[in-house]
Amino acid sequence: MTSATWREGVAHLAADAAFGPWVERVGPVDDLVSREPCFEYLTRAIVFQQLAGAAARTIHGRVVAELGGVVTPASLLAADPVRLRAAGLSAAKTKAILDLAAKAGDGTVELAEQALGALDDDGVVDRLTRVWGVGRWTAEMFLMFRLGRPDVWPVGDLGVRSGWARIHGLDERPAARDLGDAADHLRPWRSAAAWYCWRALEFTDDDTP
């Protein structure tokens, strides 16, 4: 998602009765799209799954050091899994990044940016979730923050659902099955809406617009 695309999304949300005050309170969205190679980005995403930022960064740094600073399918497949575990990876994450390396290396999961760019959002999700340990949420984050897709709506994310509840003054967060239709009026800018849902949780009740 380019800076221009973020700006269009923000302008759309600013005119919405619920999101508008939060757009004013939080401010504009920065360009959040990573330029990291797709394979490196996904490897990092797997390492970061279900970990706090500081711990994840430490473990990721150790893994990169173990690979000699070169994160490729070949370097991962040549690495000693025991040493990857010693760097701080769980058994499940070690299995996941090695499966990613194997499938990216043999072409089972094509990660060339041009090839991914030719797919629609569902096609990208289908491709990435062929990797063991990569679920829909990780694929959706890849769509938003690596490919820059503007209309990703991760209803399975508790933060998005909780933020939606706060923005709309609801006592309880909606179920995932209900949130899809509820945000239809925000198409095609639901990636920006998700970002504001996350940001809304960073404010105390006294800071609520």
Image (cartoon, rainbow, N blue to C red):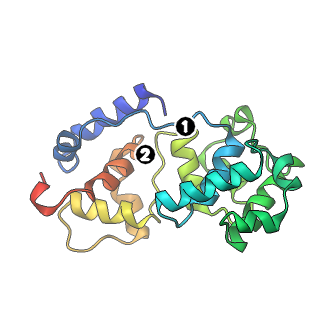
Q: CA distance from mark 1 to mark 2?
A: 15 Å
Number of the front mark, 1 or 2? 1
Residue 51 x, y percent position in the rendering: 52, 65
Looking at the rendered structure, the kind of residue marked 2 is: Ser
Above or below: residue 171 compared with residue 140: below
Residue 57 x, y percent position in the rendering: 55, 54
- Judging depth in this view, the residue of 93 and 168 nearest the camera is 93
Residue 132 in view in this figure: no
Q: Earlier in the sequence, mark 1 or mark 2?
A: 1
Q: Residue at x 48, y 58 (%)?
A: 54
Residue 56 shown left or right of residue 170 in the figure: right
Please give the residue where the numbered disc 2 appears in the rendered image.
191
- Judging depth in this view, the residue of 169 and 184 nearest the camera is 169
Residue 81 x, y percent position in the rendering: 82, 65
Above or below: residue 90 compared with residue 139: below
Q: Residue at x 68, y 44 (%)?
A: 40
In the picture as drawn, the residue positioned furthest to the top comes out as: 4
Residue 62 in view in this figure: yes
Considering the numbered disc 2 on the image, is that residue within a helix, a strand or a loop? helix
Please give the residue where the numbered disc 1 appears in the rendered image.
34
Residue 138 shown left or right of residue 6 in the figure: right
- Judging depth in this view, the residue of 170 and 204 nearest the camera is 204
Looking at the rendered structure, the kind of residue marked 1 is: Ser
Considering the numbered disc 1 on the image, is that residue within a helix, a strand or a loop? loop
